[in-house]
């Protein structure tokens, strides 16, 4: 079975909930303390065995490619006197390939993923990572997804239980029957009204998909807001080859929302003894 070595990072979104910060930088560059969301996502991918990073970008924003620029001159300058800073400049190992593909038009997540079509081989599965779903976990969240996808050769999504009132912000699945943390999926709906949600399991921003998903995406119609939804293509994949879900084993912060972003920063800050003491003091 071919290894999964490519990951697609849709990073062309507007980030409207973080304006004006996102006027000139993508929301994926917002930092959790000192490290941008996209870098956490890239590190997770590389740790899971990914060696090709495909960023689907908005054509007006180049900050992500700048962020991953190796900056050899600055590195050399720091190397002697400030080696800890030199190390911080190494955002991606040099042997990891990076590809930047402009999305052209902001037509939604499905449209963004479709832009990677020519970079994925026909017999290859690939990961999709939404960096604004920030995950802290002991086990790399991509690995169980990859294992389940490789075993079944089916599109596989990561899910977690979501509070009822928030279900309408997610793709929501109907699980068939959980076996350990994996289930076949009987239904998947994009952002349902709560009364129509098929379960409490919301899809979070980690997917492993077969090449065939591009066929479904090409046939997917724009929704009422003009977007091509990945969820709609996955519904067709479910009817065709089948769809699976894997329960996330870890803590996720929705950094597409201000609340999630602040909580993620607090969570990471509390892992640093000095910051923790300062926070506890300020709150007492
Ligand atoms: C997207 C997907 C949705 C998924 C969510 C996970 O929505 O369309 O199905 O549940 O990501 O974060 P967005 O957050 O871009 O509105």
Image (spheres, grey):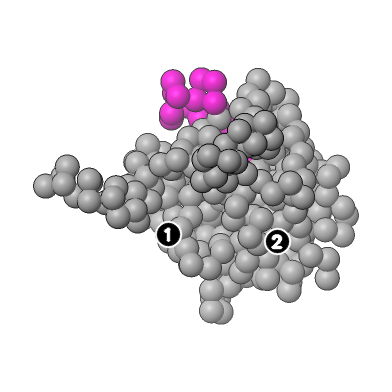
Q: Is residue 25 visible?
A: yes
**Residue under label 2:** 49
Q: Position of residue 215 (x, y in %)?
A: 81, 47
**Residue under label 1:** 251
Residue range (magenta): 10-25
Q: Is residue 16 magenta?
A: yes
How many numbered circles are shown? 2
182 w.r.t. 21: above or below: below
| Residue ID at (75%, 33%) | 101
Front-most of residues 160 and 172: 160
7 w.r.t. 200: above or below: above
Front-most of residues 180 and 174: 180
| Residue ID at (47%, 63%) | 137
Q: Residue furthest left?
A: 284
Q: Quadrant of residue 114?
A: top right
**In the rendered view, does 230 fall on the left or right side of 163?**
right
N-term mark: 1 or 2: 2
| Residue ID at (52%, 60%) | 159
**For the residue labelled by badge 1, is the local secondary structure a helix, a strand or a loop?**
strand
Q: Residue 193: which numbered mark, if any? A: none
**In the rendered view, does 207 fall on the left or right side of 264?**
right
Q: Residue furthest bottom?
A: 179
């Amino acid at each position: 079975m071919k290894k999964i070595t490519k990951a697609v990072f849709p990073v062309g979104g507007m980030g409207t909930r973080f304006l004006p910060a996102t006027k000139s930088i993508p929301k994926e560059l917002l930092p959790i303390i000192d490290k941008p969301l996209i870098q956490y996502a890239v590190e997770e991918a590389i740790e899971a065995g990914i060696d090709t990073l495909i960023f689907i970008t908005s054509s007006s924003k180049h900050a992500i490619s700048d962020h991953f620029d190796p900056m050899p001159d600055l590195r050399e300058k720091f190397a002697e006197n400030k080696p800890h800073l030199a190390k911080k400049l190494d955002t991606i190992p040099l042997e990891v390939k990076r590809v930047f593909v402009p999305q052209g038009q902001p037509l939604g997540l499905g449209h963004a993923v479709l832009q990677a079509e020519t970079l994925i081989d026909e017999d290859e599965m690939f990961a999709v990572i939404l960096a604004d779903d920030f995950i802290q976990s002991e086990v790399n969240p991509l690995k169980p997804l990859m294992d389940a996808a490789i075993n079944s050769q089916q599109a596989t999504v990561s899910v977690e239980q979501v509070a009822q009132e928030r279900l309408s912000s997610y793709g929501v699945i109907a699980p068939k029957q959980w076996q350990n943390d994996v289930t076949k999926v009987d239904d998947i709906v994009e952002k349902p009204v709560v009364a129509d949600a098929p379960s409490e399991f919301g899809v979070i921003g980690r997917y492993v998909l077969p090449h065939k998903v591009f066929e479904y995406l090409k046939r997917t119609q724009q929704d009422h807001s003009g977007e091509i939804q990945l969820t709609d293509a996955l519904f067709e994949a479910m009817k065709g080859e089948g769809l699976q879900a894997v329960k996330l084993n870890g803590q996720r912060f929705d950094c597409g929302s201000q609340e999630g972003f602040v909580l993620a920063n607090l969570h990471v800050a509390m892992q640093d003894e000095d910051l923790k003491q300062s926070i506890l003091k300020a709150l007492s």
